[in-house]
Amino acid sequence: MIAYIDIISGISGDMLLGALIDAGYSIDKLRKELDKLGIEYEIKAKKEKDGPISATSVYIHSEERKIRRLKDIIKIIDDSQLEEDIKEKSKEIFKKIAGAEAKIHGIDIEKVIFHEIGAVDTIIDVVGSLIALKELGIKKVYSSPVLLGRGKIKSEHGILPVPAPATIELLKNKPVIFTTTPTEITTPTGAALLSLAEFSYPEMEIKKVGYGKGKKKLDFPNILRIVIGKEMNEGELYIIETNIDDMNPEFYPYIIDKLLKSGAMDVFILPVVMKKGRVGNLLKVLSSPKKLEEIKKILFEETTTFGIRYYRVRREILERKTVQIKTKYGNVRVKIGYYNGKIVSVSPEYEDCKKLAMEKGVAIKEIYEEAKLHFFQSFYTQ
């Protein structure tokens, strides 16, 4: 299952959590999981209308007035009975929030304070959203561009511009739309949670829809919509490519081998003439969506490229079957391709032909043709 976060007015942690509850995650199950944190809190979910739309509001209350820094929140998470993947993702998000705050205020990350009730709010919003995403079976998250308001807000640090500096920092390298809405509509917590998302428009079969309600009253519905369903691009792959003209060509075999071992489905190189008439190579990699990030990392770390391109492609493959054919030289596996039930391709396995050619001292093409001949003879006599 995948989820698409449709940012209608903005996003905050409680809006995302409310949308996930609205989409079907049980508040009782959520409480049971959040109790593993060992902090004092109360949480309620309530259906409310915002204009013509009914959405779920999340209310969090705590009497705690503790000042917590990043290390304190990390300790709460580490000491909890939460599942390990939830712990790791939660800590990663809190480090992102603290890192953004530290950079903006020019202080060490360990000195960043999650102020009073806000600390409990943020813990519940982040951990609760991660729990709900997992329990709803969501494996991948997509999002629309982030909407941002304008103006000023009062904070523990004084008057800050909107969008808040930490929000802007957290949204670097992500698509945003600046609006004329005169208030904060995307919070740092909401921005940090979007680190889970890929910003694109999925093709999906919709199963569930949830609406989370924001606390501010706007001139339009202040809601966040989450759409959950089955991704329809199962036949889609990615092409990742880059032009290179300044790398030692001896590196290519090593890089190709590393890419293939990492899960790339194919890697190939094309000669190209680049700008200023320079001769170079176009390195192209075929990848499944789940291997995309790993392959990007290899390309950036192992090649001299300063940039890559990637885009989705559709692939259609023949139905395949492998049989073993007995020839006078030995056994050879033969791959058969079917289209609409009809054989359209027959290909002896190269490694088998190579092995026999070396063992028997025979040309590989002879073994190849012998295997095909025996296949068709056995096929037509069946």
Image (tube, rainbow, N blue to C red):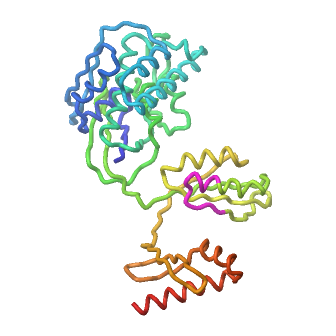
Asked if residue 265 is among those painted magenta in the image, a careful observer would answer yes
Q: Residue at x 39, y 27 (%)?
A: 185
Viewer-side residue, 325 vs 150: 325
Spot occupied by residue 85 in the image (x, y as percentages of width and height): 42, 33
Q: Residue at x 40, y 83 (%)?
A: 342
In the visual, does 222 lie left or right of 294? left
Spot occupied by residue 41 in the image (x, y as percentages of width and height): 29, 15
Q: Is residue 316 above or below residue 44?
A: below
Q: Residue at x 29, y 21 (%)?
A: 35
Quarter of the figure with residue 188 = top left
In the visual, does 366 lie left or right of 162? right
Viewer-side residue, 289 vs 56: 289
Spot occupied by residue 14 in the image (x, y as percentages of width and height): 33, 26
Quarter of the figure with residue 320 = bottom left
In the visual, does 260 lie left or right of 377? right
Quarter of the figure with residue 8 = top left
Asked if residue 226 is among those painted magenta in the image, a careful observer would answer no
Range of residues picked out in magenta: 258-268
Q: Is residue 10 above or below residue 199?
A: above
Spot occupied by residue 349 in the image (x, y as percentages of width and height): 57, 74
Instruction: Report the number of discs.
Output: 0
Viewer-side residue, 238 vs 360: 360
Q: Is residue 46 above or below residue 327?
A: above
Identify the image quadrant of the C terminus. bottom left
